[in-house]
């Protein structure tokens, strides 16, 4: 079973989309802030990380930058998500993430991007 780390400080969004991914056959781990996201990425070694940009403790793009520079985690695909669509593409390129989705997130868009990155391994 493929593992996904979903990081967002919006509890309702995290719950709903995590349930959707679990129904899709994925094992989902949740984190609500930047430091917890780093800890879980290193301890769980997920196959994919879905990462909100604006998080308590450390922004998601900073988390992505750290993960992309580390030997253990640099190949894990990261999808950035944010309600701030105006800066999302620039942040995504700067931190080395592999994709991005603006909020509100449509379930079908999330599922499609997850499948693309998990199946292709990028």
Image (cartoon, grey):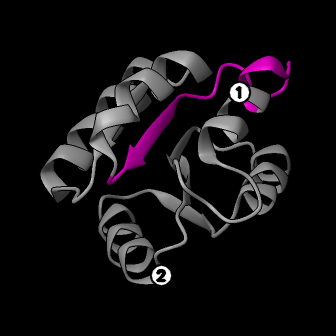
Among numbered discs 1 and 2, the one appearing first in the sequence: 2
Q: How many marks?
A: 2
Residue 92 or 121: which is nearer the viewer? 92
Task: Where is residue 71? Give x, y as percent.
Answer: 85, 18
Give the image quarter of residue 72.
top right
User: Which residue: 66% across, 19% down?
Assistant: 75
| Residue of label 2 | 11
Q: Secondary structure at mark 2?
A: helix
**Label 1 to label 2: alpha-carbon separation:** 24 Å
Q: Residue placed at 32% from the left, 77% from the top?
A: 16
Task: Say above or below: 41 vs 17.
Answer: above
- Horizontal and vertical percent position of residue 77: 54, 28
The answer to the question of whether label 1 and label 2 lie on touching residues, with beta carbons closer than 8 A, is no
Q: Quadrant of residue 118?
A: top left
Identify the residue shown where x is 34% and y is 48%.
84
Q: Is residue 25 above or below residue 38?
A: below
What numbered label is drawn on residue 32? none
Provide the residue designation for mark 1.
65
- Left/right placement of residue 38 relative to residue 114 reads right
Indicate the secondary structure of the residue bearing disc 1. Answer: helix
Residue 73 is one of the magenta-drawn residues: yes
Q: Is residue 84 above or below residue 113?
A: below
Q: Nearer the viewer, residue 84 or 71?
A: 84
Q: Is residue 67 left or right of residue 79?
A: right
Horizontal and vertical percent for residue 101?
30, 41
Of residues 22 and 41, the one nearer the viewer is: 41
| Residue stretch rendered in magenta on the structure | 67-83
Whether residue 79 appears in magenta in the rendering, the answer is yes
> Residue 95: horizontal and vertical position, in percent?
61, 23
Q: Residues within 10 Å of mark 2 (few under 14, many from 20)?
A: few
- Please rate how many residues cluster around mark 1, counting C-alpha atoms within 10 Å: few if below 14, some from 14 to 19, many from 20: some
In the visual, does 82 lie left or right of 2? left
């Amino acid at each position: 079973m493929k593992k996904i780390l979903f990081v967002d400080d919006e509890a309702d969004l995290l719950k709903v989309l995590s349930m959707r991914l679990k129904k899709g056959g994925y094992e989902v781990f949740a984190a609500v802030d930047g430091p917890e996201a780093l800890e879980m990425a290193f301890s769980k070694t997920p196959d994919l990380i879905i990462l909100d940009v604006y998080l308590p403790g450390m922004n998601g793009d900073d988390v992505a930058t750290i993960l992309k520079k580390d030997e253990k985690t640099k190949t894990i695909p990261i999808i950035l998500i944010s309600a701030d669509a105006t800066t999302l593409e620039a942040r995504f390129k700067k931190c080395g993430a592999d994709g991005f989705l603006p909020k509100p997130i449509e379930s079908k868009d999330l599922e499609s991007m997850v499948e693309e990155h998990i199946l292709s391994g990028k």
